[in-house]
Image: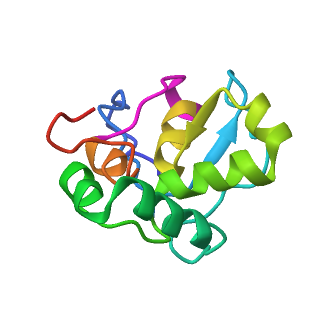
Amino acid sequence: MTSPANSSPRPVAAVAVSGIGPCVLPTTADGRPLRPAILYGVDTRAAAEIVELTERLGEDAIVQRGGNRLTTQAVGPKLLWLARHEPDVWAATRRFFMASSFLVHRLTGSYVLDHHSASQSDPLYDIRARA
């Protein structure tokens, strides 16, 4: 975008980043992807892990902690699937990103995740404790 000839360019005050659904991108410590991201709800590869985690932890406890039952959107089952089915990638992984956090990392070097995205990381994130 160009500015009018008689105006001075201004410094960028802010940049907003957003992403669709909780995808999982495993990376090295410096943010280099180790495999293509596992997408949000359209990727159903972790169906068995959803059943297993729900049975092990209990649906009520999962909902109490994260606000939702486990579905193909949830990050936790995807991580368990990755550990089981791609152990070499799992062993090399030092960070996990979602789409928005990966873009923020590329733009700023910061490794952060907003509360809303973190809340989609069932059953890992406690919505009340925000941790």
81 above or below 111? Answer: below
- Which residue shows up at 59% across the image and 56% down it? 78
- Which residue shows up at 70% across the image and 51% down it? 82
Residue at the extreme left = 128
- Which residue shows up at 33% across the image and 38% down it? 6
Q: Position of residue 48 (x, y in %)?
A: 60, 70
32 above or below 48? Answer: above
Q: Is 36 on the left-hand or right-hand side of 107?
A: right
- Which residue shows up at 74% across the image and 40% down it? 33
Quick one: quadrant of the C terminus?
A: top left
Q: Quadrant of residue 130?
A: top left
71 inside magenta stretch: no
Q: Position of residue 40 (x, y in %)?
A: 52, 67
66 above or below 126? Answer: below
Residue at the extreme front = 56
Main SS category, magenta section: loop
Q: Position of residue 61 (x, y in %)?
A: 25, 54
Report the number of numbered marks: 0
Q: Position of residue 74 (x, y in %)?
A: 45, 60
Q: Which residues are magenta?
A: 106-114
55 above or below 17? Answer: below
